[in-house]
Image: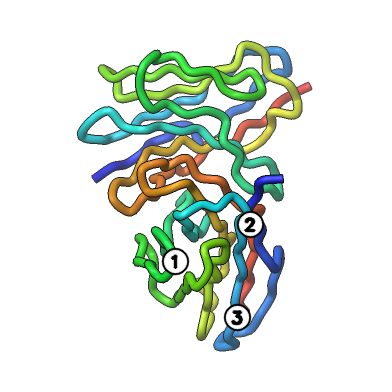
Amino acid sequence: AQSVTQPDIHITVSEGASLELRCNYSYGATPYLFWYVQSPGQGLQLLLKYFSGDTLVQGIKGFEAEFKRSQSSFNLRKPSVHWSDAAEYFCAVEGGSQGNLIFGKGTKLSVKP
Amino acid sequence: EAQVTQNPRYLITVTGKKLTVTCSQNMNHEYMSWYRQDPGLGLRQIYYSMNVEVTDKGDVPEGYKVSRKEKRNFPLILESPSPNQTSLYFCASSLGTDSYEQYFGPGTRLTVT
């Protein structure tokens, strides 16, 4: 069965520092992969997605993610974090015939001034 | 503006009192889904619908009902709510089951006492 692991529950970075959020998935083939962001009190907003092709995908708000099949990973990166990036980040993989997404448990990002 | 709307956004109710959370999308999406989000568990799918009059159980359907009489609406019904249904609920929609790129509503925070 598909699954997603986000090893870090909570990460704190300084404003202006680089960021990498880890995501590992379990899936039988090349999956569709997603990163969503949830700001406090808000719904989930799609940051970026990987379906096929170039393994480095660009998203909104300056985020990017790299698909590495050999490591079953899809880590999210940003070169310089802004205070407004403080939120919870969810990695997700396609769920199969249900059309759903299988989500990781999320990584909460705090940004120090 | 393309969006998924949910009402109410916040609801406090008592055990056993039937309630309905409405969900509507204006993107002509075929696929709609309900998730619940609980701390430490991420998002889990409750029910989904591939089209009008076609609904099916997700991963955690117990205690919930849904209907899809119109393409744009997908209400979630709790006929006899219990405290373990206290959660944050999200409605989502996508073009179809092959799309997986889901658009989320703002969420409904439900408390059952």
What residue sits right under mark 1 in the picture?
B52
Q: How far apart are marks 1 and 3 (CA)?
A: 22 Å
Mark 2 or 3, nearer chain start: 3
SS category of the residue bearing label 2: loop
Q: In this view, does B62 lie above or below B38?
A: below
> x, y percentage for residue A87?
65, 36
Badge 2, how many Cα within 10 Å: few under 14, some, many 20+? many
> x, y percentage for residue B10?
71, 66
Residue sitting at x 64%, y 48%: A43
Tell me the tag on residue A37. none
What residue sits right under mark 3 in the picture?
B19
Q: Mark 1 lies on which chain?
A: B
Image quadrant assignment for residue B72:
bottom right
Q: Is residue A18 left or right of residue B52?
A: right
Q: Which chain carries label 2?
A: B
Image quadrant assignment for residue B14:
bottom right
Residue sitting at x 51%, y 84%: B79
> Foreground residue, B106 or B112?
B106
Q: Quadrant of the C terminus of chain A?
A: top right
Do residues under tags 1 and 2 come within 8 Å of each other at their CB atoms? no
Q: Distance between the residues labelled 2 and 3?
A: 16 Å
Mark 1 or 3, nearer chain start: 3
Mark 1 or 2, nearer chain start: 1
Q: In this view, does B85 lie above or below A27?
A: below
Please state which of the two labelled residues, at mark 1 or mark 2, is closer to the viewer: 1
Q: Is residue B101 above or below residue B20?
A: above
Q: What residue type is labelled 2?
A: Gly
What residue sits right under mark 2 in the picture?
B107
Badge 3, how many Cα within 10 Å: few under 14, some, many 20+? some
